[in-house]
Image: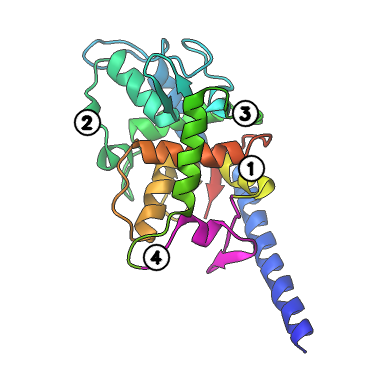
Amino acid sequence: MLFVATGMAQAQQKSTADAIADYRASLQDGNPADLNAARGEALWKKPAGPKNASLQGCDLGLGPGKVKGAVAQLPRYFADTGKVMDLESRLVHCMVTLQGMKREDFKASTAFSRDGERATVIEDLVAYVYDDSRDMTIAIPQSHPEEKRSYARGREMFYFKGGPYDFSCASCHGEDNKRIRLQDLPNLTKQKPAQEAFSQWPAYRVSQGAVRTMQWRLYDCFRQQRFPEMQYLSPASVDLITFMGVNANGGKMAAPAIKR
């Protein structure tokens, strides 16, 4: 009887997961993030800021102005800053250096739109850059010592337990066959589920009516763990993204995806 009950539970879980996957696939052709990407492309090309400059001189790792495929290789080390940077930290760097924006103006409250609000400049730009890397192979580099250190710190952070419930990232994403409500929780320590998870962010959240970036995803995970607020573009956030990205190497970019 126990074997039968276990089999029924597994079949039900698989059926639910399949139904959610079918739901997402049915919506993908009309993904509202396409509109964000179109606005983001216009923002990329439009002069803005105190210097009245566009972002077309921004180097995302493949050379100034080259967008296609760039995000499939981020986070990575940038010699001009001496840091490993993800897409959002690199975009902000370019907006500061090329357009004359102020770094202190970029924080979670200004980078992430609230329910019902128009998408932020960051959200639209992120949608554009990711959309231009769709179907590209994920190849997060580990050739520079700083890239290796970033991965190691990210891995340590992934397993670090803290907060009032003694949670870690691994509490939800370090084992197989875990879920919360109807949502499967991918095991980010294994290549295939890591590829599927990493490749699909940023994503349009149907329940929120907004594009949510990878930085937002981590910010919200920290909130759910009851950890202290993750600071936007903090080294900790970049290190965690590096850890996830390297684990996902070899997968195909599929963002912006669509989520419940």
* Whole-percent x, y for residue 21 in the image: 65, 55
Residue bearing the label numbered 1: 195
Q: Nearer the viewer, mark 2 or mark 4?
A: 4
- Circle 2 — which element? helix
- Could you tell me the amino acid type at mark 4? Asp
Residue bearing the label numbered 3: 139
Q: Residue at x 26, y 10 (%)?
A: 52
Q: Nearer the viewer, mark 2 or mark 3?
A: 3
Q: Earlier in the sequence, mark 2 or mark 4?
A: 2
Q: How many marks?
A: 4
* Whole-percent x, y for residue 3 in the image: 78, 82
Judge left or right: residue 220 versus residue 34: left
Q: Nearer the viewer, mark 3 or mark 4?
A: 4
* Whole-percent x, y for residue 37 in the image: 48, 30
Residue bearing the label numbered 4: 166
- Circle 3 — which element? loop
Residue 174 among magenta residues: yes
- The CA span between labels 3 and 4 is 33 Å
Residue bearing the label numbered 2: 105
Q: Which residues are magenta?
A: 165-188
In the rendered structure, are the residues bearing label 2 and label 3 in contact, judged by CB atoms less than 8 Å apart? no
- The CA span between labels 2 and 3 is 31 Å
Q: Earlier in the sequence, mark 2 or mark 3?
A: 2
